[in-house]
Image: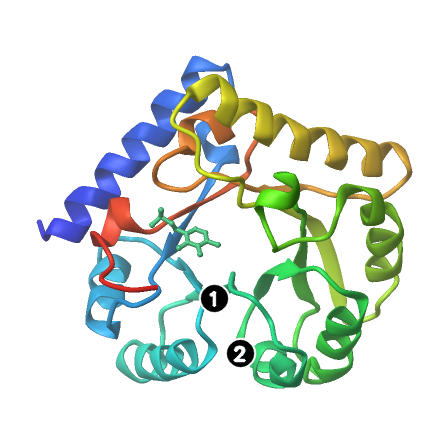
């Protein structure tokens, strides 16, 4: 087995353990392998080991990799998730090449993604990124502005609003990790109570995925635990 296959196996085991510990079905937690900065060859190793959903942050790098993977294994169903900051003048290639976008934080970007989703493709799955760490973080919509943004995004014809995403400030302490994820979960619950149908909480990375699973994560975004440490981001 390759190193990547071993690490995928270890992450799957960790997801199972964390799910079991809180009485959740491990099948309800999807592993998104974050392949940013790693070459197509390593993504192909992960695909060979059975992983089919990948997260990318940097648009040009991602587009090159998606093309390389498509050329190498045209018959494999690979799902691509955009999880990086979005510049509003770069929405067209995102709308055309990705299945999911986790980092919607402005209506203008959502409107462009919807307008630019090519005809004939399924609606683009999106999550709204929420700033649950206050001033410490620059990314994500403020919780107070979330309900109105969610309402507007849910109306866009070529998007499906699936849920919420957050990148909390790094915390070592497990209780503090959980408190941040619990805030995201509560925000999603409030939107559901208001009538939105959301099935996704995208939260948890290599260092805090157990806490995220305990608070209801349905997608964990894991990079370094699978591909190793990155030199740069
Ligand atoms: C890089 C990144 C990850 C993966 O982080 P690791 O600590 O390597 O697991 C997850 N989510 C987002 C948004 C990222 O940018």
Residue at left offset 51%, top offset 64%: 84
Distance between the alpha carbons at the discs numbered 1 and 2? 8 Å
- 31 vs 17: above or below: below
Query: Is 192 situated left or right of 82 in this image?
Result: right
Residue at left offset 27%, top offset 65%: 43
Quarter of the image that includes the C terminus: bottom left
Q: Quadrant of residue 55?
A: bottom left
- 27 vs 75: above or below: above
How many marks the image carries: the answer is 2
Q: Residues within 10 Å of mark 2 (few under 14, many from 20)?
A: some
Q: Residue furthest left?
A: 1
Q: Residue furthest front?
A: 135
Q: Is residue 212 visible?
A: yes
Which residue is at the front of the view, 135 or 47?
135
The residue at which mark 2 appears reads as 97
Q: Position of residue 114 (x, y in %)?
A: 76, 75
Which residue is at the front of the view, 20 or 90?
90
- 160 vs 5: above or below: below
Which residue is at the front of the view, 153 or 120?
153
């Amino acid at each position: 087995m390759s190193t990547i296959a071993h690490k995928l196996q270890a992450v799957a085991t960790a997801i199972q353990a964390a799910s079991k510990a809180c009485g959740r079905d491990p099948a309800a937690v999807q592993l998104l392998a974050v392949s940013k900065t790693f070459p197509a060859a390593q993504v192909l190793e992960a695909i060979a080991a059975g992983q089919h959903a990948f997260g990318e942050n940097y648009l040009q790098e991602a587009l090159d990799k998606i093309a390389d993977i498509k050329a190498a294994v045209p018959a494999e169903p690979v799902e691509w998730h955009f999880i990086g900051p979005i510049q509003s003048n770069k929405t067209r290639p995102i709308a055309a090449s990705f299945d999911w976008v986790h980092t919607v934080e402005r209506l203008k970007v959502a409107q462009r993604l919807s307008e630019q989703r090519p005809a004939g493709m399924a609606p683009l799955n999106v999550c709204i990124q929420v700033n649950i760490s206050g001033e410490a973080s620059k990314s994500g919509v403020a919780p107070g502005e979330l309900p109105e943004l969610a309402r507007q995004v849910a109306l866009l014809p070529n998007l499906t609003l699936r849920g919420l995403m957050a990148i909390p400030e790094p915390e070592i302490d497990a209780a503090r990790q959980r408190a941040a994820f619990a805030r995201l979960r509560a925000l999603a619950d409030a939107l559901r109570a208001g009538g939105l149908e959301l099935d996704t909480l995208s939260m948890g990375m290599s260092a805090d995925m157990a806490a995220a699973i305990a608070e209801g994560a349905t997608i964990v975004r894991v990079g370094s635990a699978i591909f190793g440490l990155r030199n740069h981001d």
